[in-house]
Amino acid sequence: MSSIAVPTAREPNFLATVLAVVRRHVLTVYSFLFFAYLLLPIAVVMIFSFNNPTGKFNYTWQGFTWDNWRYWDGVPGIRSAIFLSLEIAVVASVIATALGTMIALALVRYGFRGRATTNILIFLPLSTPEIVLGASLLTLFLNLSFVTFGFWTILIAHIMFCISFAVVTVKARLVGFDRHLEEAAMDLGANEWTTFRKVTLPLTAPAILAALLLCFAISIDDFVVTYFNSGSEVTFPLFVWGAARIGAPAQVNVIGTAIFVVALAAMLVNVVFQRRREVRA
């Protein structure tokens, strides 16, 4: 008499095993696909910085070459454009971070009339479309007859919209700041300036550095506001926009890759520095 094998409860359930594997790795797969989606355009830019196009357009792979990196300034106007963007980004980020840090300290530490209104005004540039911001600044500068469009109008515009990012970044750090550390320093005889220099500033330095890097990245990347207020000056984003209409040269990919690598290196240095500080503490 033949017997029929009946599965017992101890035998593994195939469907349950598959579901368990999916639940265990779905977040990893999703994260990998998400970052791949974000980094794919950057990878294309880096790859095509080594392309050797035969014409004006750098859209199809035609061969490997180092000449684009060796002669990165071979395209007329690209050197002056990148130097102008770097100059404006450095100055604007330093000024915006300094002003934003002081505004954040005032908003967190002190109560004054108009504090709530100031908080709202700080967030307005973050929520306002860039085209509205650029047009508004253009109207303002046009009404000031003594203003000449160029370096200074671009710098003022960049400082204006970068301040909000600096305030938000530094303010987030100051909200969770332990005021007892400052009080302890002052109880030990330190005055206000010494307390700020030796206690407040070192503890808020990571947020200040993050604000500085964020403002630099936003400034060097801005196109819309700069386009409205640049006059005859040409920054790197404006150069890319103008070059793309007739064929973007491979040197544009070279500059983009260099900016990305430098920004990534600065971020890694900041992370390593913060970890070392945590270990020492």
Image (spheres, grey):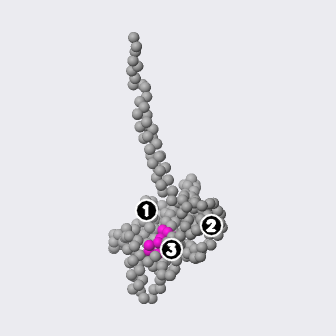
- Identify the residue position indicated by label 3 in the image: 242
The secondary structure that dominates the magenta segment is helix
Separation of disc 2 and disc 1 at Cα? 42 Å
Placement of the C terminus among the 4 image quadrants: bottom right
**Badge 1: how crowded within 10 Å, few (<14), some, or many (20+)?**
few
- Identify the residue position indicated by label 1 in the image: 172
Residue drawn at (52%, 72%), measured in percent from left and top? 246
Give the magenta-colored segment's residue range.
218-226
Nearer the N terminus, badge 3 or badge 2?
A: 2
Separation of disc 1 and disc 3 at Cα? 39 Å
Nearer the N terminus, badge 2 or badge 1?
A: 2
- Callout 3, which amino acid? Gly
Task: Name the foreground residue: 111 vs 205.
Answer: 205
- Identify the residue position indicated by label 2 in the image: 68
Q: Is residue 12 above or below residue 59?
A: above
**Badge 2: how crowded within 10 Å, few (<14), some, or many (20+)?**
many
